[in-house]
Image: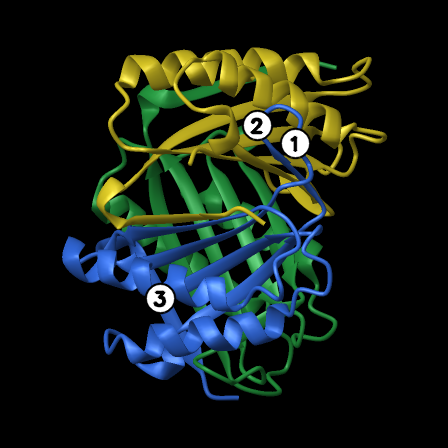
Chain colours: A blue, B yellow, C green
Amino acid sequence: MPHLSLEYTQNLVDYDAPQALRILGQVMFDSGLFGEADIKSRAYRLDDHLVGTGDTGTAFLHVQVSLLCGRTDAQKQALGARIAAALKSTLPAVNGPVQLTVDVRDMNRDCYAKEVLPG
Amino acid sequence: MPHLSLEYTQNLVDYDAPQALRILGQVMFDSGLFGEADIKSRAYRLDDHLVGTGDTGTAFLHVQVSLLCGRTDAQKQALGARIAAALKSTLPAVNGPVQLTVDVRDMNRDCYAKEVLPG
Amino acid sequence: MPHLSLEYTQNLVDYDAPQALRILGQVMFDSGLFGEADIKSRAYRLDDHLVGTGDTGTAFLHVQVSLLCGRTDAQKQALGARIAAALKSTLPAVNGPVQLTVDVRDMNRDCYAKEVLPG
């Protein structure tokens, strides 16, 4: 932990997902809440998306961050706000409406397992 | 918010995911719980799936809806039931066993961030 | 329910995801907590991933198990530990650092819908 998942809609043409992950990883690390090697991120390109009941023109970026429980709501809120701001910076020249959302969720510390293999 | 994620297994050949998203988006909107432009949906095709320990023949459709907390369990239960019924309607002539499941989960309102860029 | 999602990074070359799902499905079934036909699993290959702020060389495997609430933390912890051990067994000869993580989360029983179509 933590885990960060970024979803971006396919109509964000030429969206630089690897660069976005680097920017978001930096925000996560700069929060001071996590060790660098613990931050695991991935990006999903959404080939089929929809806004409302028929709008495929609007784009969206959505980030879900999953943390082991124990951080305060204030810490999580601050982290979410920083991620939202960073997300905005990952967009190239805006060429249409985009929604940006961030969901910070807790994982149950007692039900989480982890192992690191040194390779 | 809300966010809706639809997963469908690849053995549902010719499954019309864009149409399914439109149907599900309509159900979400008709619930009266959300503004239309706030409903963000996506579909994932599952290339590798399994039921039980060895069954790749059974198909499944799974929907996860993520809402900001504050709706009652009764509202969420009714929404889940309507989505399940709509999911069923998205299936073409059934050509094998299919499982349909819907999970309605809360997001922590205090840890959610959102921004809309007008384009 | 239950739902199991396996994510694996693309730098785990030749990772046998179908075999991994069979192994994990067996662990789920052997737990005695679920009927075999209820266990629904899927694997996602992560084309874009990152560890920390710039490390794309480290690999990771992450499993999320979603259960209807009602199991004890001890049951969930034991299940998570068994899944982590099984995950490790799915790796071929290790050729670099790999992180393995397992998150067992509850779903709200009152907001879950399910239907089985016999085909």
The residue carrying mark 1 is A55
User: Which residue occupies 27% across, 32% down?
Assistant: B69
- Position of residue B97 relative to residue C11, above or below, is above
User: Which residue occupies 78% across, 30% down?
Assistant: B12
Secondary structure, mark 2, is: loop
Marks 2, 3: nearer the viewer: 2
Q: Position of residue A73 (x, y in %)?
A: 17, 53
Disc 2 from disc 1: Cα separation:
6 Å
Query: Which three-letter amino acid code belongs to the residue tagged 1?
Result: Asp
The first of marks 1 and 3 along the sequence is: 3
Label 3 crowd bin: few (<14), some (14–19), many (20+), radius 10 Å: many
Q: What is the count of numbered marks?
A: 3
Query: Which three-letter amino acid code belongs to the residue tagged 3?
Result: Pro
The first of marks 2 and 3 along the sequence is: 3
- Position of residue C56 relative to residue B118, above or below, is below
Secondary structure, mark 3, is: loop
- Please state, as top left, top right, bottom left or bottom right, where the N terminus of chain A lies in the image: bottom left
Label 2 crowd bin: few (<14), some (14–19), many (20+), radius 10 Å: many
In the image, C33: left or right of B3? left
**Near-viewer residue (B96 or A38):** A38
Classify residue C67 by image quadrant. top left
User: Which residue occupies 82% across, 13% down?
Assistant: B93
Disc 2 from disc 3: Cα separation:
31 Å
Whether the residues at callouts 2 and 3 have beta carbons within 8 Å, the answer is: no
Q: Position of residue A64 (x, y in %)?
A: 42, 53
User: Which residue occupies 51% across, 77% down?
Assistant: A22
Whether the residues at callouts 2 and 1 have beta carbons within 8 Å, the answer is: yes
The residue carrying mark 3 is A2
The residue carrying mark 2 is A52
